[in-house]
Image (cartoon, grey):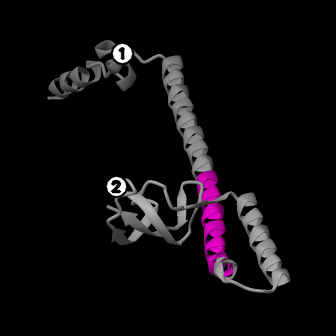
């Protein structure tokens, strides 16, 4: 019986055991470590470029928001002063015997207009202009043979805009 055990033990010992690395080497070629590093470098470079582009977009977006916020604040501030402009126009339209009073109101209105122009605010809505629903608010219509169709016949309230933004629409009477 000892011989049978010896044969079984020797058969077990004689069976060669292959390490895992050798088994993989036979089935497939081992990857080159420089290729793996090149792939990793390319991936990191791509991530860097994406991050740089994201940062650039963020910087541009915040700059636009800042400019927009400034323009909106300026438009709101000008809008708060428009009743003063309206009152000065009404004062100019009134007949008065006091020339010094009339000259003072005229100078004040002119100074106000100079400040608005310096801020980039444009006045619009005068009689004879073509009616534009994006800029004008038609509160009345009149049939007038002397005026062309969709022409402003009378202005009740002047309109103002800052750049492309309308601060206040002009209130007008339009000829049909």
Residue 116 on the magenta span = no
Task: Pinpoint residue 57: horizontal percent, then vertical percent.
Answer: 56, 45
Residue 82 on the magenta span = yes
| SS class, disc 2 | loop
| Lateral position of residue 157 relative to residue 28, left or right | right
The region drawn magenta spans: 62-88
**Residue 170 visible in rendering:** no
Q: Name the residue under label 2.
A: 149
Q: Which of 171 and 81 is in front in this view?
A: 171
Which image quadrant: the N terminus? top left
Seen at 62% across and 67% down, the residue is 75
Q: Name the residue under label 1.
A: 25
Seen at 74% across and 72% down, the residue is 109
Q: Is residue 21 above or below residue 135?
A: above
Quarter-wise, where is residue 3 in the image?
top left
- Whole-angstrom CA distance, mark 1 to mark 2, is 90 Å
| SS class, disc 1 | helix
**Residue 159 visible in rendering:** yes
Task: Pinpoint residue 52: horizontal percent, then vertical percent.
Answer: 60, 39
Quarter-wise, where is residue 27 in the image?
top left
Callout 1–callout 2 Cβ contact below 8 Å: no
**Secondary structure mostly seen in the magenta stretch:** helix
| Lateral position of residue 112 relative to residue 81, left or right | right
Q: Which of 5 and 41 is in front in this view?
A: 41
Q: Give neighbour class at mark 2: few <14, some 14-19, many 20+ (Cα, 10 Å).
A: some
Which image quadrant: the C terminus? bottom left
In the current view of this chain or complex, which residue is farthest to the bottom?
A: 97
Res. 164 mark = none
Q: In this view, does 76 lie above or below 6?
A: below
| Lateral position of residue 63 relative to residue 6, left or right | right
Task: Pinpoint residue 19: horizontal percent, then vertical percent.
Answer: 37, 24
């Amino acid at each position: 019986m000892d011989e049978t055990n010896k044969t079984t033990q020797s058969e077990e010992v004689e069976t060669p055991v292959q390490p895992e690395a050798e088994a993989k080497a036979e089935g497939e070629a081992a990857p080159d470590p420089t290729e793996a590093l090149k792939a990793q470098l390319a991936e990191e470079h791509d991530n860097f470029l994406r991050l740089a582009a994201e940062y650039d977009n963020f910087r541009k977006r915040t700059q636009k928001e800042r400019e927009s916020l400034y323009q909106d604040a300026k438009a709101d501030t000008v809008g708060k002063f428009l009743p003063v402009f309206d009152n000065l126009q009404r004062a100019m339209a009134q007949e008065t015997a006091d020339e010094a009073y009339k000259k003072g109101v005229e100078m004040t209105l002119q100074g106000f207009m100079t400040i608005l122009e310096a801020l980039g605010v444009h006045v619009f809505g005068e009689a004879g202009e073509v009616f534009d629903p994006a800029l004008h608010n038609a509160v009345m219509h009149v049939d007038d043979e002397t005026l062309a169709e969709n022409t402003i016949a009378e202005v009740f309230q002047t309109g103002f805009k800052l750049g492309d933004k309308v601060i206040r629409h002009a209130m007008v009477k339009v000829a049909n």
